Amino acid sequence: MDRLRVQGGQRLAGEIPVSGAKNAALPILCAALLSTQPLDLDNVPRLHDVDTALRLLSQLGVRSHREGHRVQLDASAVSSVEAPYDLVKTMRASILVLGPLVARFGEARVSLPGGCAIGQRPVDQHIKGLQAMGASITIEHGYVVASAKRLKGTRIVTDMVTVTGTENLMMAATLADGETVIENAAREPEVVDLAAALVAMGARIEGAGTDRIVVHGVQALHGASHRVMPDRIEAGTFLCAVAAAGGRVTLTRAQPSSMDATLDKLRETGAVIECGTDWIRIDVQQRARAINLRTAPYPGFATDMQAQFMAVNCVAHGTGIITETIFENRFMHALELQRLGADIAIEGNTAVIRGVAGLSGAAVMATDLRASAGLVVAGLVAEGETLVDRIYHLDRGYEQMEIKLAALGARIERVRA
């Protein structure tokens, strides 16, 4: 099993590119199921979760060809509508095949999902929405079993804002009979990117990026080409690394327009941020100031950036308060940060972080994808050596993180445990 060895104390400098967004690529890969014609994708990140998605699609009968960051998908000969537990258990986004399968084939059998152990992430909103569109759904032996002759357009009001729920229902609605209105829809940029890919395939969608999405169903979707948006969470993670360690770094192939909340909080730490259409430059020449933040659905502060900012607060001047409102079990990294010498007090969904003058390297264990990124950020400023174990979590969502950080001057390497 691999781990990362980090020797802290190096300021960061240079230029690195931002990879394609995992959370945009996964639903767009599943959208290939909606058409008999090829879907050509560019800027698809090389990640374990993407590999899992391609294996799942292959098991359904989707042919795929990958060359670098380009992927071509052909779902003209789908041979199965069952997404088995052994694949779905490792990646919650596998539930995103449910809507496309029911919409195009009238049936699906999808295992209830797994993923990171950061709290409950139920799929009841997916099921409720599909039932409103006329699908018959039962839960049998850990599988969601759905059937429908043809989905019918309707008005769906979700009980909570759910990104994958919005994506699943939006994909299903593209082939439904009539108009579907999704109220309380997720507004995340990744939802907008999926909508753009679907529109390129011939879907009729209005309102993506707002809390009311209208989909006019069509008889069939066709082939298309699409470039996956840049990963705003990866970009934010590298910016946090600079905020903690200091230095001057430029991110290319970025999308700063999708990162307002993250960039605003970085400026509160004292970082100097400059942005162009597709680049971000951060300059940090002094110790960060502690900040308060509260996670919220987009355009609020992303829960996926919480651990990285906690790491910045650990070495910042002053006391910062972080309130987690999305997932009830997403402070597990705090215990690992304490092993490095951080001063963190947890009460319920609130963490109080008192900045310390320095951290000390130690062996730590990643508990989920973004927690592992936060531990790497902390390791970059800790004195001595930090060993981050269980980085298979990291590999689910970051493409060659250690190589990119090394290019900025960090002393970091992947080693065998």
Image: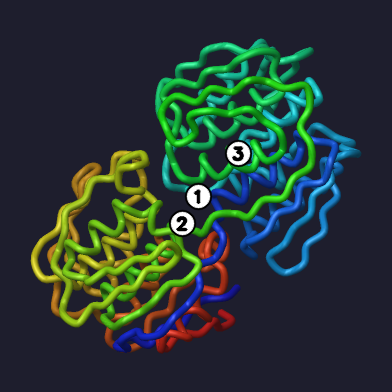
Viewer-closest of 276 and 367: 276
**Disc 3 marks which amino acid?**
Pro
The residue beneath circle 2 is 368
Res 142 visible: no
- Can you tell which quarter of the image residue 12 is in? bottom left
Local crowd at mark 3 within 10 Å, few (<14), some, or many (≥20)? many
Q: Residue at x 69, y 36 (%)?
A: 97
Q: Secondary structure at mark 1?
A: loop
Residue found farthest to the front: 277
Residue found farthest to the left: 318
- Can you tell which quarter of the image residue 105 is in? top right
Question: Which color mode does the image show?
Answer: rainbow
Q: Residue at x 52, y 18 (%)?
A: 181
Between the residue at mark 2 and the residue at mark 3, the CA separation in whole angstroms equals: 16 Å
Q: Residue at x 34, y 60 (%)?
A: 333
- Can you tell which quarter of the image residue 364 is in? bottom left
- Quarter of the image with the N terminus in it: bottom right
The residue beneath circle 1 is 116
Local crowd at mark 2 within 10 Å, few (<14), some, or many (≥20)? many
Report the side of 73 relative to 357 (left or right). right
Between the residue at mark 3 and the residue at mark 1, the CA separation in whole angstroms equals: 10 Å
Proximity of marks 1 and 2: CB atoms separated by less than 8 Å: yes
The residue beneath circle 3 is 113
